Image: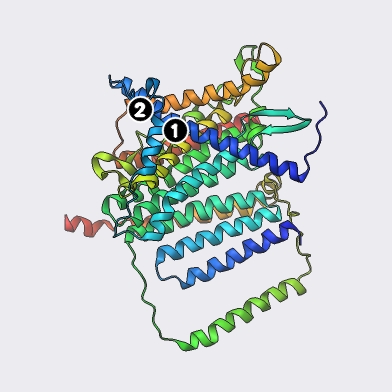
Amino acid sequence: MESKALSVGVFILVSVIKSVIVLVVLLTAVAYTVWLERKVVGHMQNRWGPTRVGPFGLLQPAADGLKFLFKEDLTPPHVYKPLFLAAPMMALIFALTSISVIPFGNSITIFGYSIPLQITDLNIGLLLILGVTSLGVYGVALAGWSSNNKYSLLGGLRASAQMVSYEIALGLSLVGVLIQSGSFSLRVIVDAQGGRFLGFIPRWNIFHGQFVGFFIYLMAAYAETNRIPFDLPEAETELVAGYHTEYSAMKFAMFFMAEYANMITVACLATLLFFGGWHGPLFGPPLLRSLLPLFWFGAKIFCFLFLYIWVRGTLPRFRYDQLMSFGWKFLLPLAIANLVATAIAVVW
Amino acid sequence: MSFHLILFLAFGVVCVAGAVNLLAQRHPINSALSLIAVMAALAGEYLLLGAEFVAAVQVIVYAGAIMVLFVFVIMLLNAGEEEHTNGSRVALLLGVPGVLTGSVLVAWVVLRQSETEAVPIGALPGHPTDIAQLLFHDFLLPFEVTSVLILIAIMGAVVLASKPETPAREAA
């Protein structure tokens, strides 16, 4: 099908529409990931989780949102106010920014315009995500510092040390994939994973030599998002609530949303880099064929989110020295070894 | 004026304003945050020039790693507000005009006297492939030597930071 080039006006209109859709979908996904987590962890601990608001507690996120909005927004007197206010915003902004380069599927053609299912396709897409993730630490660190509270400060310090340490392993674990696909563009990386080995094994990077790389990525990503077993910055048994001890109402909700948005971004990235993105079996009538890639993408992300919750329901928290020695003495050398092995294999 | 040029000037203004704010602020953490703003604005400038990879690396390395360590140290030491001395009026009277003349002079020399042309907006060869060709092919030896230099610096820092053994034993 012949597709027209987009004029400036149409381009801006399409970009705005795409951004709004992606934002709405992302925030809904964030809300229902919280619901899923409460439900799944509840069942793992032999209780029901939310059941009262709506069928299966499905309206619980809406009730929570209203509660956050109507709660009194306390600002303790001893905080450093400008940064205390800015920190949750920074956390949320950086968490939402990285979704802008995530592709959800191939192009679709509407009214003769070919529109890629992605807000913007940069040829440094992956680097942008890494850069934004590395800025995300400021939200947490500044929240901890500006609260002027020892528990918050300890949480902020732990968060910045942890995120800087695991970022290195995270970045190195992705280099293997980059060497194989030869591009930073997420679309190119996904396109390189189409097709099958031996007719039935999908040509995803995880089956294409990046098995170790995937597990390094998974562990480093859990640490980057401050999730159990790496949730030391907000360890409730030691630090009250860590960096967000002093936050209430919507400002607390912003940290909460940022954490879950980061989880979703990490799951998207894992899907795109290691599990073939939207590639999956296509069948049926044309409409089903065009919707199936989106379904596969969503299903893979769901699996990752479920894994997150499963891990949370299973593992205890690391001790701080264990966390640091695991990151620097195990994960980092393993990532470097994986990088060297991949490079040798590709050159061969 | 093209949209690119407007953005370029806007980022430039942010950059300079951040740098001035960095000096004017009394609290170290505010200064550090202004420096982050300068870094981010510089990344924007690189992006406009077409050097996408350099822009991304600028954010990841400077704003994301080095400045996090700055903030970390300020938080760890709990550095308070600095006291400004009212002192040197000479610095104010000579320093500010001096810096202004200096920067104008440097800009004039760079613009007028250099033999290379100014890079038009968006024309810098900034694709990762070009950078990789330069780093790992044309300038491989300097690149590797620099990495060894950094390694030596890291080892030096470890040696300096680790306590000498004998006093520790005496204390125990």
> What's the residue type where badge 2 is placed?
Arg
Vertical relation: A78 (above or below) A57: below
Residue A38's tag is 2
Q: Foreground: A296 or A112?
A: A112
- The residue depicted at 60 percent of the width and 49 percent of the height is B56
Q: Chain of mark 2?
A: A
State the CA–CA distance, disc 1 to disc 2.
11 Å
Element marked by disc 1: helix
> What's the residue type where badge 1 is placed?
Ala
Q: Position of residue A61 (x, y in %)?
A: 41, 32
Query: Among all residues in the image, which is located at the extreme right?
Result: A2
For label 1, the residue is A31
Relative horizontal placement of residue A288, taking residue A312 as reference (left or right): right
Vertical relation: B101 (above or below) A239: below
- Determine if residue B148 is in view: no
Vertical relation: A264 (above or below) B54: above
Are the residues at dot 1 and dot 2 in contact (C-beta closer than 8 Å)? no
Quadrant location, the N terminus of chain A: top right
Q: Foreground: A97 or A9?
A: A9
Q: Position of residue A76 (x, y in %)?
A: 30, 56
- The residue depicted at 38 percent of the width and 27 percent of the height is A37
Q: Foreground: A45 or B130?
A: A45
Vertical relation: B25 (above or below) A321: below
Relative horizontal placement of residue B1, taking residue A288 as reference (left or right): right
- Which image quarter: residue A38? top left
Relative horizontal placement of residue A143, taking residue A274 as reference (left or right): left
